[in-house]
Amino acid sequence: MTTLTERYVDEVARYLPQDRQDDIRDELHGLITETVESRTHQSQDHQVAEHQVLTEMGEPAQLAASYTDRSMTLIGPRLYRSYISLLKVLPGTVVPLFTVGYAVLELTDGRDFTDILASSALVGLNLGAQLFTLVTVVFVILDRTDRTPDAKWSPSQLPKNRPASTKDAKPGRAATAWLGLSIAVQVAVFILIVWQHRAAPYTLDDGSQVPVLEPELFSGWIWPILTGLAAVIILDVLRAAGRTWTIRFAAIYTVAQGLFFLPLAWVFSQQLIFDQRFLDHFNNHGWHTPDEFYTGIALILIIWFCWTTFDQFRTSRQADHR
């Protein structure tokens, strides 16, 4: 079982550059041990002395910031690295995917290639700016509301039983990349749903433009779907910022997913998802999309919702027992 000092040093190291972690860990551990022993020799209880020393040293993220030369004022040191990581993932996935998709749709409409390049670049820049603004605003709000300004840090707030190795304490690169990719796909889906309704990008034989999704959805079912998707995106951003699974967090996440998956499954089961004009043209005026397709998609959505709900509560219970 790790000591309070080891947990504190591990937490500080999480916010440090990889190449400086070992040296600073050794230096910090030695400094804390020496100070605690000095106070213990003065007839002070060891555990009390250790708790006081760590309290005086302050929040690990703030102490880690003092070891670096970065200026972290808009986004505090506790969330800064997660903020930068997310900014690297989202523009590198959502923007290229959406830009290429937009260019392909424009190309199928027979537009001039030069015009397509110009308009696609403009769309990509605009989307990138919006993503940057959205992520920044969310992290600024998190940094200022997650903890009251006057709240005093205490060693009791340290994660329990964190592994001695910082590498083991951090989420793996694969898990981090998967979460970032998941957020990117969700943002892209949200944007595409709204965009296709406004732009009606599909061209029929007579040159008229129609949306892909049934327009009537925007008079009812699409709003809980979009609300749930937006809530899931925000909660995943919180996870990327370092929020761990708890029973309460899992419950909120389940509600958000339910808002998204269950109405979407119902819409598929009732075959209300696609615009009929789009379907007729896409199916070449002859082939009929089988009912099993819609039923199968609905079942997959429900099964996925049930599995992720079970996994989230299982993860939160495991975290609570650590």
Image (cartoon, rainbow, N blue to C red):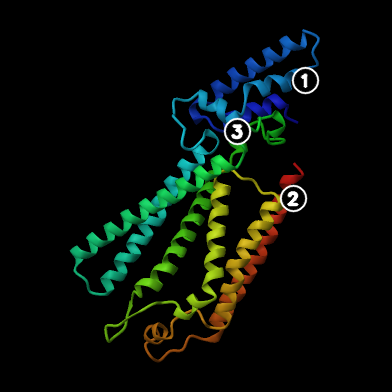
Q: Is residue 175 visible?
A: no
Q: Does 148 sit above or below residue 55? A: below
The location of residue 241, given as percent across then percent down, is 55, 44
In the image, taking residue 114 as reference, residue 18 lies left or right, namely right
Residue located at (39% from left, 53% from top) = 130
Distance, label 3 to label 2, CA atoms, is: 23 Å
Quadrant in which residue 121 is drawn: bottom left
Q: Amino acid at mark 3?
A: Thr
The location of residue 243, given as percent across then percent down, is 61, 45
Q: Secondary structure at mark 1?
A: helix
Does label 2 or label 1 sit earlier along the sequence? 1
Count of numbered circles on the image: 3
Q: Amino acid at mark 2?
A: Arg
Q: Amino acid at mark 1?
A: Val
Residue at which label 3 appears: 166
Distance, label 2 to label 1, CA atoms, is: 31 Å
Q: Quadrant of the N terminus?
A: top right
The reply to whether dot 3 and dot 1 touch (C-beta < 8 Å) is no
The location of residue 13, given as percent across then percent down, is 57, 29
Residue at which label 2 appears: 317
Distance, label 3 to label 1, CA atoms, is: 26 Å
